[in-house]
Amino acid sequence: MTTIRWIFLVLLIFFIYHLIRDILQILNVNNLFSNIGHRLHEWCKPYCNYVTIPPELFGIVASAIVLIRNKVGMTGKILLLSLPIWLIFTLLR
Protein backbone atom coordinates (compact mmCIF):
# COMPACT_ATOMS: atom_id res chain seq x y z
CA MET A 1 0.00 0.00 0.00
CA THR A 2 1.38 3.39 -0.94
CA THR A 3 1.87 6.24 1.47
CA ILE A 4 -1.02 8.23 -0.03
CA ARG A 5 -3.42 5.30 0.49
CA TRP A 6 -2.26 5.01 4.12
CA ILE A 7 -2.83 8.74 4.66
CA PHE A 8 -6.38 8.55 3.33
CA LEU A 9 -7.08 5.36 5.26
CA VAL A 10 -6.01 7.09 8.49
CA LEU A 11 -8.15 10.10 7.56
CA LEU A 12 -11.14 7.85 6.89
CA ILE A 13 -10.75 6.16 10.28
CA PHE A 14 -10.32 9.54 12.01
CA PHE A 15 -13.42 11.06 10.43
CA ILE A 16 -15.54 7.98 11.19
CA TYR A 17 -14.35 8.00 14.81
CA HIS A 18 -14.97 11.74 15.13
CA LEU A 19 -18.49 11.45 13.68
CA ILE A 20 -19.41 8.59 16.03
CA ARG A 21 -17.95 10.49 18.97
CA ASP A 22 -19.93 13.63 18.12
CA ILE A 23 -23.15 11.63 17.77
CA LEU A 24 -22.55 10.02 21.17
CA GLN A 25 -21.90 13.45 22.71
CA ILE A 26 -25.08 14.85 21.15
CA LEU A 27 -26.99 11.94 22.69
CA ASN A 28 -25.25 12.59 26.07
CA VAL A 29 -23.58 9.18 26.13
CA ASN A 30 -20.51 9.59 28.31
CA ASN A 31 -17.91 6.85 28.15
CA LEU A 32 -14.23 6.49 27.36
CA PHE A 33 -14.90 6.29 23.61
CA SER A 34 -16.95 9.50 23.52
CA ASN A 35 -14.69 11.47 25.89
CA ILE A 36 -11.21 10.56 24.62
CA GLY A 37 -9.51 13.55 23.02
CA HIS A 38 -12.50 15.80 23.69
CA ARG A 39 -11.97 19.36 24.80
CA LEU A 40 -14.60 21.91 25.64
CA HIS A 41 -14.52 24.86 23.26
CA GLU A 42 -15.94 28.22 24.21
CA TRP A 43 -16.04 29.64 20.68
CA CYS A 44 -18.71 27.29 19.32
CA LYS A 45 -20.64 26.46 22.47
CA PRO A 46 -23.36 24.86 22.34
CA TYR A 47 -23.00 24.00 18.64
CA CYS A 48 -19.55 22.36 18.66
CA ASN A 49 -20.85 18.83 18.14
CA TYR A 50 -23.05 19.94 15.25
CA VAL A 51 -20.55 22.25 13.53
CA THR A 52 -18.16 19.44 12.68
CA ILE A 53 -20.71 17.00 11.22
CA PRO A 54 -20.69 18.37 7.61
CA PRO A 55 -16.85 18.41 7.36
CA GLU A 56 -16.72 14.93 8.91
CA LEU A 57 -19.18 13.60 6.33
CA PHE A 58 -17.14 15.24 3.57
CA GLY A 59 -13.98 13.69 5.00
CA ILE A 60 -15.54 10.22 5.04
CA VAL A 61 -16.88 10.50 1.49
CA ALA A 62 -13.73 12.11 0.07
CA SER A 63 -11.42 9.57 1.72
CA ALA A 64 -13.55 6.70 0.45
CA ILE A 65 -13.55 8.14 -3.08
CA VAL A 66 -9.77 8.48 -3.08
CA LEU A 67 -9.32 4.93 -1.77
CA ILE A 68 -11.77 3.46 -4.29
CA ARG A 69 -10.38 5.37 -7.28
CA ASN A 70 -6.78 4.89 -6.13
CA LYS A 71 -6.20 8.48 -7.27
CA VAL A 72 -6.11 11.69 -5.21
CA GLY A 73 -7.79 13.98 -7.76
CA MET A 74 -9.57 17.21 -6.88
CA THR A 75 -11.61 15.64 -4.05
CA GLY A 76 -8.51 14.42 -2.26
CA LYS A 77 -6.74 17.74 -2.73
CA ILE A 78 -9.68 19.64 -1.24
CA LEU A 79 -9.70 17.26 1.73
CA LEU A 80 -5.97 17.68 2.30
CA LEU A 81 -6.29 21.47 2.03
CA SER A 82 -9.04 21.43 4.66
CA LEU A 83 -6.85 19.75 7.29
CA PRO A 84 -5.20 23.00 8.52
CA ILE A 85 -8.70 24.31 9.30
CA TRP A 86 -9.22 21.34 11.64
CA LEU A 87 -5.95 22.21 13.39
CA ILE A 88 -6.95 25.86 13.78
CA PHE A 89 -10.35 24.95 15.26
CA THR A 90 -8.68 22.43 17.58
CA LEU A 91 -6.37 25.11 18.94
CA LEU A 92 -9.17 27.65 19.51
CA ARG A 93 -10.39 27.72 23.07
Image (cartoon, helix red, strand yellow):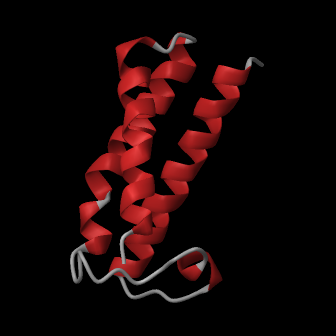
Q: Position of residue 57 (x, y in %)?
A: 35, 45
Q: Tell me where residue 67 sits by quadrant.
A: top right
Q: Is residue 20 left or right of residue 89?
A: right
Task: Locate residue 76, reporting x and y percent.
Answer: 44, 23
Q: Quadrant of residue 87?
A: bottom left
Residue 36 lies, in percent from the top left, at 61, 77
Residue 37, above or below 80: below
Q: Report the number of discs.
A: 0
Q: Is residue 43 above or below residue 55?
A: below
State the residue at coordinates (33%, 79%). Answer: 26
Residue at the image point whose x is 36% and y is 15% from the top: 74
Residue furthest to the right in view is 1
The image quadrant where one finds the N terminus is top right
Query: Is residue 77 or residue 69 the one in the foreground?
Result: 77
In this rendering, the answer to whether 20 lies above or below 80 is below
Left or right of 9, for residue 55: left
Residue 56 is left or right of residue 34, and the answer is: left
Query: In front: 9, or 80?
Result: 80
Q: Residue at x 43, y 65 (%)?
A: 90
19 displayed left or right of 30:
left
On the image, the x and y values in percent for residue 93 come to 36, 78
Residue at 24% from the left image edge and 63% from the top image edge: 51
